Amino acid sequence: MTDNPSVHAYRADALGDLDGTALAQAIRRHQVDVREVAEAAIARAEAVNPSLNALAWPTYEQARRWSAHQAVGGRLSQGAFAGVPTLLKDTVDLSGHPTQLGSRIFRSRLARSDDPFVRQLLAQGFNVIGKSRLPEFGFNGTTEYQDGSATVNPWHTGYSAGGSSGGSAAMVAAGVVPLAHGNDGGGSIRIPASACGLVGLKVSRNRLVNAQLSRSLPLNLITEGVLSRTVRDTARFIAAAERTHHHRALPAVGLVEGPWAKRQRIGLWLNPPGDVAVDDDTRAAVMRAAHLLTQSGHTVEPIEAKLTQAHIDGFLLYWGMLSFSVGHFGRLLFAGTDWDVKRYEGLSQALMQRFTRRWYQLPAAAVALHQFAQLNQRCFAPYDAVLSPVTTHVSPPLGHLHPGLAPEVLIPRLVGYVGFTPLQNVLGTPAIAVPMGMTRSDPRPIGVQLAAQAGREATLLSLAYELEAQAPLRRLGLA
């Protein structure tokens, strides 16, 4: 790892190597000062961001003012993560700052108020030190740009950090903050979590407050959430978020603090869509997880489930409709100036053009998306959870999914890579990515996915705790 070394920010400061739960506890007990914590996170960000290119906008001065105010007279927020530094993905508004959505086709104005989801997150006491990078409008499975720049994987900087929440994933994995915001419209939390050795939960549709942008979609596939280094941080975030918003159609998750005694029936899904094969390292990671779960007393059974080309085409057409809508109506949706769709990056253009050529297929696409539910009932619903890869292969080298590649090369690569993740977005069901080992060469993390029926996040968290305990991933920076 000499040509492309790993990058991390861990050091002997107020953050140490604590996760968010432990750090919040240390702050509450006055073992560390909230101002020192903010300064440590800012120093770490400044140290590694030149290498990672993961930060879209720093909000350091606002973070300093917030921590100073919290420290005066002991008026610390009572939230579950009071004083814990974090990042917001640059898709949601933070008052007084731009929201650029990874794009150069417009210039964002400063937000006048916080996004509804941001208000839910801030209610937990987080201190936002910046906004993280994403590929243009979150369309790609890697955080790379037309000009050749990229957010790199801190485990090995020659590889992708995933997308679209790649900036948040890189900063959490590198130790800048314990957990950070992401959102997921086709795998955008789970893919970077897998690539960077993190826990990434995509919740059931409407489990968390929907961001303002996703409320305008004809079918909302996007859910908000976090990427973290520990299962307990993700579990605590969900439990705390329920105190400010609980959708009545979903059972409460509550605070899941460890594995359940009850043993589960788990389906093992290894058939990706199309003709793409699962690579050896990824298959080995999934089989290792299956073995560990079987050893723990769970029943793991293979599932024969295959997404058809009609399923894939339906999702692609919807994806293309989003790109078309942004390109043609974005100036009405986003608070920006200098709108110039000619500066659209290659992938965005390819998706938009695909929709322009095939818009008349929308009724067939709607039928195909409806068939996802039939596939779910037939193949997945009989199980308490389904174990699968997150992606069909391990994190690719930079350039493999570059947005400037010819569409006939890029789109099949992208569809093949994300194979297992879009299903839950269409269904509105939860899924979690959990670290499960490293690649054999150029060591990078590999994650596996556990999915369940709508409302069953607690089942996934209990299983994730088991895998975390049996196969802990070493922290980046440790030998």
Image (cartoon, rainbow, N blue to C red):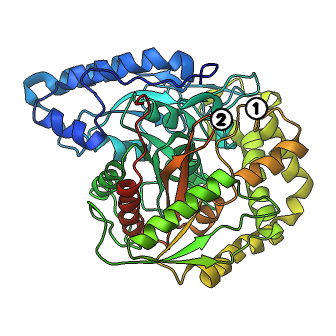
Quadrant assignment, res 308: bottom right
**Mark 1 closeness class: few <14, some 14–19, many ≥20 residues within 10 Å:** some
Residue topped by disc 1: 399
Q: Can residue 253 be seen in this view?
A: yes
Question: What is the total number of numbered labels drawn onto the structure image?
Answer: 2
Regarding mark 2 in the picture, which secondary structure is present there? loop
The circle drawn on residue 132 is none
Residue 298 in the image: above or below residue 429: below
Q: Is 15 left or right of 477, judged from the image as shown? A: left
Residue topped by disc 2: 135
Residue, x 67% and y 44% (percent of image)? 141
Q: What residue type is labelled 1?
A: Gly
Residue 159 in the image: above or below residue 460: above
Q: What residue type is labelled 2?
A: Pro
Residue, x 30% and y 36% (percent of image)? 126
Q: Nearer the viewer, residue 221 or 16?
A: 16
**Mark 2 closeness class: few <14, some 14–19, many ≥20 residues within 10 Å:** many
Residue, x 19% and y 37% (percent of image)? 77
Q: Earlier in the sequence, mark 2 or mark 1?
A: 2
Residue 229 appears at what percent x and percent y? 39, 43
